[in-house]
Image: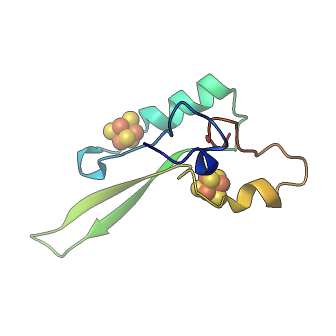
Amino acid sequence: MPDSAANGGSPTGRWAKVIDHTRCIGCHACTTACKSENEVPLGVTRTYVKYADVGTFPAARRAFQVTRCNQCDDAPCTTACPTRAMFRRPDGIVD
Ligand code: SF4
Ligand code: SF4
């Protein structure tokens, strides 16, 4: 059972997120969904997918790295943000 002190005092458990990067095909549907759901303005992206070409021909391939918030335990964004737009919710999620 999670430690409630490390969970912002929430007694309901602690959220975790797992992404299997090996299954990502780089379609950017998540990037688009995030922008749409959160009304992220043009020119700003909160989640994006990095492409990396690895290996050499004929064994070359493209790898994808889905890049989004990692929900750091000690989240520097929450103290760096001057307007407190970034903050930790009582249930532990960095929002
Ligand atoms: S780019 Fe996003 S939506 Fe597309 S496969 Fe990768 S993780 Fe899924
Ligand atoms: S918790 Fe803050 S510092 Fe950590 S990955 Fe998310 S946005 Fe970045």
The structure residue drawn at horizontal position 58% and vertical position 33%, both measured from the top left corner, is 11
Q: Quadrant of the C terminus?
A: top right
Color style of the picture: rainbow
Residue farthest along the top direction in this orientation:
37
The structure residue drawn at horizontal position 35% and vertical position 64%, both measured from the top left corner, is 52
Please state if 17 lies on the left or on the right of 4 as rendered: left
Q: Quadrant of residue 79?
A: bottom right
Q: How many marks?
A: 0
Q: Nearer the viewer, residue 37 or 16?
A: 16
Residue 70 image point, x, y percent: 53, 53
Say if 92 sits above or below 81 in the image. above
Residue farthest along the right direction in this orientation:
83
Residue 8 image point, x, y percent: 67, 43
- Ligand number 1: quarter of image: top left
Q: Quadrant of the N terminus?
A: top left
Q: Nearer the viewer, residue 17 or 38?
A: 17
Residue farthest along the bottom direction in this orientation:
56
Q: Quadrant of residue 58?
A: bottom left
The structure residue drawn at horizontal position 76% and vertical position 46%, both measured from the top left corner, is 86
Residue 78 image point, x, y percent: 76, 53
Residue 27 appears anywhere in the view = no
Residue farthest along the left direction in this orientation:
58
Q: Nearer the viewer, residue 91 or 52?
A: 91
Q: Quadrant of residue 46?
A: top right
Residue 51 appears anywhere in the view = yes
Please state if 59 lies on the left or on the right of 17 as rendered: left
Say if 1 sits above or below 57 in the image. above
Residue 75 image point, x, y percent: 67, 58
